[in-house]
Every structure is written in structure tokens, then in C-alpha cells.
Amino acid sequence: MTTTLSAANPTGPPPPPPTMPAAALAKNPETLVREALDDIALVIGGAAAIHHLDDDLVWTVMKRLDRIRVRLLRDLKGLTPCDELELNPAWPPRIH
């Protein structure tokens, strides 16, 4: 026979404390940053496709987002900042 617990009937074992999923505990900050920025890139790409934005604008935004990612991951790892601009003369393909 089981009974429903209430304020009038507080007998029974207390509920277990809420726990975090094991996957959330196993993720380090670098993984969380990478996943978050991947999601942001997908949102930007989706908006660009829906609203027919110019490819050059999309690539500029994505390059800047990548610079933010690199800078943030360097800070998380404790590496010294690199102020040099990475110049890439080759244009990426025009697919997004």
C-alpha cells in the first residue's frame, strides 16, 4: 500500500536532491564555448539564408565570430594574446 505524501502526512523518504546530468558535468569550458559559438554561427547562417544576405557580409561576420572564438579559447587556456591579424588571401567558397 502506498500513500501520497502531503503536509499532513510527511512520512516517507525525502525526495532525492536534484542532480546534474553526467554529460553536463563532464564538459569543460572550452567545449561549452565551442558548442555555444557553433550554435550562434548556425543562427547567423540561417538568418542569412532566409533574408538573402550578401555573401561578403556573411563571410565577414563569420570571420569576426571566429576571431572571437580564437581569442576566447586562448584566454581560457591561459595563452598569451596574439594581436597579429591572420591574413588569408584565398577567399572561402561562396556556400553558406
Image (cartoon, helix red, strand yellow):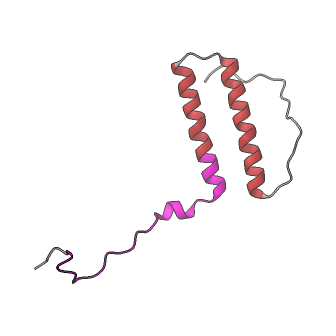
Q: Nearest the camera: 9 or 3? A: 9
Which residue in the rendered view is the most extreme toward the right?
A: 84
Q: Looking at the rendering, which quadrant does residue 36 occupy? A: top right
Which residue shows up at 51% across the image and 20% down it? 50
Residue 58 higher or lower than 78, as above or below: above
Residue 61 higher or lower than 81, as above or below: above
Q: Name the chief secondary structure element in magenta.
A: loop
Which residue shows up at 63% across the image and 21% down it? 95
Residue 79 position within the rendered picture, expressed as x and y whole percent measured from the top left: 83, 55
Q: Looking at the rendering, which quadrant does residue 19 occupy? A: bottom left
Which residue in the rendered view is the most extreme toward the bottom?
A: 11
Q: What's the magenta region? A: 6-35
Residue 83 position within the rendered picture, expressed as x and y whole percent measured from the top left: 88, 41
Asked if residue 1 lies left or right of residue 72, the reply is left
- Residue 29 belongs to the span the image colors magenta: yes
Q: Looking at the rendering, which quadrant does residue 63 occupy? A: top right
Asked if residue 80 lies left or right of residue 16, the reply is right
- Residue 9 belongs to the span the image colors magenta: yes
Quadrant (top left, top right, bottom left, bottom right) of the N terminus: bottom left
Residue 44 higher or lower than 15, as above or below: above
Quadrant (top left, top right, bottom left, bottom right) of the C terminus: top right
Instruction: Tally the numbered discs.
Output: 0
Which residue shows up at 57% across the image and 22% down it? 48
Residue 82 position within the rendered picture, expressed as x and y whole percent measured from the top left: 87, 45
Which residue shows up at 21% across the image and 76% down it? 7
Which residue in the rendered view is the most extreme toward the front?
A: 8
